[in-house]
Amino acid sequence: MGSTNTIPEQRPEGQRLPVPGASQPYIRGVNTARTVLLYAVSAIVGILLGLAAAQVTISCTGHCVAQPRFPLWQSGVIGLAGAVVVVIACALLDEEFIPVTRQWLRAARHRISGDGRKRQAS
């Protein structure tokens, strides 16, 4: 019976062995779907905040028509600000949010500039 002699790999203290595919998301489809969901949630939050701001009125006594507190454009800005806050929170809390978004932006830039067609032709 032969014995197997395993010698641990020598490496400096604190250095880890490279894990194959560690820099890539482990399941790309899941990360993409989660990022789409987070963008959708931020859009819905923004829309709801804008609608809520549009419903705020100045109170009046007696028989008068309630005046909106914010003009329509200000309600839209409030909704947009709420959506931006949610996107920033997602970027801070989800580690794959920014890499997936960068990948989408790169792909869009290549499509717009036409680099994608040049690569396929060569």
Image: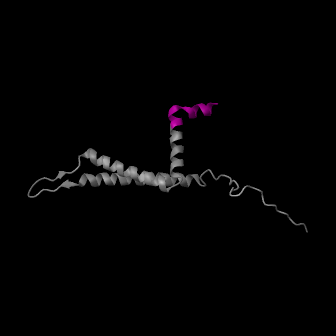
Quadrant the C terminus occupies: top right
Q: Residue furthest bottom?
A: 1
| Residue 51: image location, x then y, percent | 29, 53
42 relative to 50 in the view: left or right = right
- In the figure, is residue 23 to the left or right of 32? right
Describe residue 44's horizontal placement relative to residue 99 as left or right.
left
Q: Position of residue 14 (x, y in %)?
A: 68, 58
Residue sticking out furthest to the left: 62
Image point 20% across, 54% down: which residue?
57
Magenta segment main secondary structure? helix
Q: Residue 87: image x %, image y %?
A: 43, 51
Tell how many labels: 0
Q: Is residue 118 magenta?
A: yes
* Camera sees residue 51: yes
Which portion, as a residue range, is magenta? 109-122
Q: What colour scheme governs how the chains and residues are painted in the rendered image of this protein? A: one colour
Residue found at x 35% / y 49%: 81
Asked if residue 34 is among those painted magenta in the image, a careful observer would answer: no
Taking the view exactly as shown, the residue that stands out farthest to the right is 1
Q: Name the residue: 59% across, 52% down.
A: 25
Q: Nearer the viewer, residue 12 or 90?
A: 12
Where residue 66 appears, as percent x and y from the top left, is 15, 53
Q: Is residue 37 visible?
A: no
Residue at 50%, 41% in the rendered image:
105
Quarter of the rendering containing residue 117: top right
In what quadrant of the picture does the N terminus appear? bottom right
Quadrant in which residue 62 is drawn: bottom left
